Amino acid sequence: MEFSSKLLEKAVQEMAQLPGIGKRTALRLVLHLLKQPKEQTAFLSQALTEMREDVKSCQNCHNISDAEVCEICSNAKRDHEIICVVEDIRDVMAIENTRQFRGIYHVLGGKISPIDGIGPSQLTIGSLVEKVKSGKINELIFALSSTMEGDTTNFYIYRQIKDYPVITSTIARGIAVGDELEYADEVTLGRSILQRIPFENSFKNN
Ligand SMILES: [Zn+2]
């Protein structure tokens, strides 16, 4: 790609660093911004900078939050004894959209995946196990995608907590194997949480 402006080229290069954005798309977006009023670009860069500077990880559930403790964890109306274990913040958003879950979450930050070099210590499994050991948790709902990595992660956690008095369940699989939670429709996902099954049943039947 030949650019008539170094400034334009630099902006396109930066934009093209984003996942799913090739150079052509990056150029289209940058040219679009150039046609907009200057304030538009200022709002965009300000929003990105503020988000990057100020966004926090909730001390309790590791959800992305503006405060030290997120709105879900600080809501006294939620059931703090039921924890839904999810891979990332997109899963929290998907489950919240169903309006079927009144407990709180624990965001792992990924799944155990040796191929990608992700081991248990890179995830927030330690603090989840500590919560269970504290005795204040009544139920853990595993809501990871049902891929091999998801199953491995569920089972790894289960092995560490199975001797503690906590109910473990997994969301019912109206969701096809390998589907990511965020793509499941709200009705299916909502139902799969309400119709969750004991975790033991999920692997004994296989
Ligand atoms: Zn939280």
Image (tube, rainbow, N blue to C red):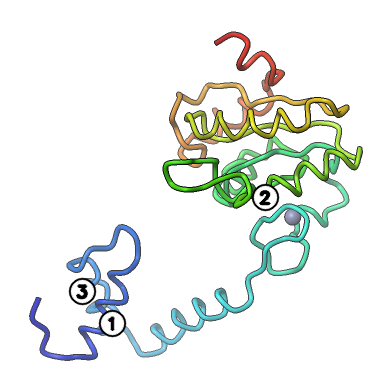
Mark 3: give few (<14), some (14-19) or many (20+) Cα within 10 Å.
many
- The quarter of the picture showing ligand 1: bottom right
Q: Which mark is residue 124?
A: 2
Image height check: is 5 above or below 206?
A: below
Which residue is more in the foreground, 104 or 42?
A: 104
Which residue is more in the foreground, 136 or 26?
A: 136
Direction from residue 51 to residue 159 in the image, left or right:
right
Which residue is more in the foreground, 171 or 191?
A: 171
User: Amino acid type of disc 3?
Assistant: Leu
The Cα atoms of the two marked residues, 1 and 2, are separated by: 36 Å
Task: Name the residue at the right extreme.
Answer: 135
Circle 1 SS class: helix
Direction from residue 13 to residue 98 in the image, left or right:
right
From the image, tell me which residue sits under label 3.
Answer: 27
User: Amino acid type of disc 1?
Assistant: Ala
Badge 3 or badge 2: first in the primary sequence: 3
The quarter of the picture where residue 4 lies is: bottom left
Residue 151, percent across and down?
Answer: 55, 28
Direction from residue 180 to residue 51 in the image, left or right:
right
Mark 2: give few (<14), some (14-19) or many (20+) Cα within 10 Å.
some
